[in-house]
Image (cartoon, rainbow, N blue to C red):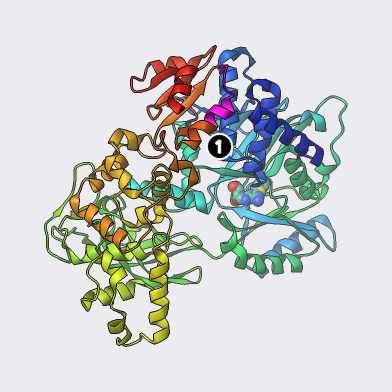
Amino acid sequence: MYNKEQIQELQAVTQDFLKNPHHIELTALKQVLQFHEYQYYVVANPFISDFEYDRLFQQLLQIEAAHPDLISADSPSQRVGNSLNQQFETLPHLVPMLSLENSYDADDLNDFDRKAKEGAQLDNINYCVEPKFDGASISLVYENDMLVRACTRGDGVAGEEITQNIKQIRSIPLSIPLSSYGILQMEIRGEVIMSKKSFDDFNQKLIAKQLPPLANPRNAAAGSLRMKDPKEVADRNLDAFIYHISFYTLQAGAKTPDLLKTHSGSLELLWNMGFRSPQKEKKLISNIEGVIQFCKDFELERDHLPYEIDGLVIKINDFALQEKLGMTSHHPRWAIAYKFKARQATTILENVEFQVGRTGAVTPVAKLQPVAIGGVTVSSISMHNEEYIKEKDLRLGDTVIIERAGDVIPQIVQSIPSVRKGTEKIIEFPSTCPVCDYILEKEETEAVWRCNNPACSAQIVERMIHFVSKDAMDIKSFGDANIRKFYELGLLKNIPQIYQLDFTQIGQLEGFGKKSVDNLMAAIEASKQQPLYRLIYALGIRYVGETTAKTIASQIHHILDLVALTEEQLQSFEDVGVKVAKSIRQYFSEEKNITLIKALENLGLNMIQTNATAIDGNLAGLNFLFTGTLTQLKRAEAEAMVEARGGHILSGVSSKLNYLVVGEDAGSKLEKAKKIASIKIISEADFIELVK
Ligand code: IVH
């Protein structure tokens, strides 16, 4: 899409704008932002950091706020939607959206090829093969270079208009250079997907909020298209592959671009226009034997892709030939889907075990009749909490559909009530802890039942398992089994004892040769130097995941600095909301936790954040934002001063902001900040005084 010179030029302008915000010119700024969106979301090769992108984006918002008449429909700011409670109008597609016929094996593909050859009266046909993306299909219409509407598939003839939601997907350009190809209007098809990573991240967030996770990335993508609030769509971090041009009209006198003679050419054209088409994923194959081999080989690659596919689509490459073959009432005769083996299976929910986690949360785990999906045998799946069981109406003895998508954690999709025999039993949640018999409690705002007995052995063991785990202190060779064993033998009763183990005794245990004892010893010793965020995460403070732990660590010097931070100060950290701040406050106000941390410090564990920015931190934990034109300092210089003192620059005015520094001609940010009492509004001179 961009050639070398254009990239160099755009990069130079980017750097200039970052260094000299006064140089910024609106049209160039929009081009720069569009370029970086493209690099990030389509090519997956970003040239600037998220932070730098945000800074430029804020500049755009500022300029547009001052000159609303200059806001164009394709400005990156126009993705941000705030039309809550959208109504979705039903609109006819320019060309009906057909579905594809399915094939499952070599015979099916040979049949397809034979019929195509007969229809075309040819001895051989060239195919273009590409992934069958497992998401939700959409159709987009561009006119005069602009995205004018986006629709769901609907019944294939008409779909619902969801343009504002689609604009939240950054790999879909808001404008494209149609006119430079002589095209006036174009309707295209594609698939909205959620990458495996975005899906996992999103589910983690749901689980942290005690909401039931989504079953698979397809549901997550499909469910988002008709959401009332575009911001929620943006939160899902969706993506889109565009694989089909269904209709186009040319400008008067223009001739059909050469690329529009074949399917592979059309993918190239789409790519050149700035879409994420399967340009690199596609494969041109000159006969059906090659296609069959490719399908078999590709199925093995499925798990290595960053997104879900449920098969491949085989398309006749030549458009003239496609036209000649035409379509049945349901599918085109020039394409077929090759479906991979299903990732879903049905099995019986035989039993439920209630497991007690490190926070005392009791999780119901379904014990299933073992079943193979995608090469793995699944016999046990988390059911998260009581709500989840009720919502899905899961009963003992039920036949359930389960799904395992690649490396995604298996989920129960649903039960099948229609095959119930009447012997299925309602799942009763226990009222006491299955390990220590303490009465379980549930807070009003929570979905989980908890054992609040601090001496519950299950919790003690789980806390130690968490402490040594890979994302926490990462003490290799100290698996769950060893922790349980040492605990049962009385060799290990609490976290500090991990660092005081009696290795002579351990050496006498069965299965512990000198080598494994030495490895364990070395791994424990090495863990003492782990970065601070790992320790914060390892402590298992409720709601403090790895990301939050990183944020917190970057804002402090010594872990015990947290004792003195108020809830308000904690909330000013990125991603730290009321609930997390309360939980951190609670943790650091308990004597036993401070004793634990001090014991670990005495045992030689690193308690210090070694990141240089936070050390000299008289602004640690404070959030700043600059608005208007500064006269004594350059904007970048002022922002660097904040960061060097441990502070943070926010991208907009919110209740997390501590200081708004106001230069000349400040606009909407100042007005907004005035409405939030907790924000201190200061001048440039005040700021210089503050950082002295
Ligand atoms: S081509 C007229 N290509 O699979 C041809 N479809 O049942 C239109 N899909 O509704 C479809 N990846 O939602 C095509 N690379 C791909 C695809 C693809 C996924 C979906 C699409 C379609 C369904 C076919």
The image shows residue 396, relative to residue 163, as above or below, that is: below
Residue 170 appears in view: yes
Q: Is residue 583 left or right of residue 309?
A: left
At a point 67% along the width and 26% down the height, the residue shown is 29
Mark 1 CB lies closer than 8 A to ligand 1: no
Quadrant holding the N terminus: top right
Whole-percent x, y for residue 54 in the image? 56, 33
**Residue 111 position by quadrant:** bottom right
| Residue identifier under label 1 | 51
- Residue 105 versus residue 149: which sits nearer the camera? 149
**Secondary structure beneath disc 1?**
helix
Task: Residue 152: tell me if it is visible.
Answer: no
**Label 1 environment density (alpha carbons within 10 Å; few <14, some 14–19, many ≥20):** few
Q: In the displayed structure, does residue 593 sit left or right of residue 69?
A: left
The segment highlighted magenta reads 629-639
Residue 96, given in percent of the width and then of the height, sits at 64, 39
What amino acid does circle 1 point to? Phe
Where is residue 159? Give x, y as percent: 55, 35
Assess whether residue 630 is covered by the magenta stretch: yes
What residue sits 49% from the left and 51% below the top?
A: 217
Residue 558 magenta-drawn?
no
Name the quadrant containing residue 148: top right
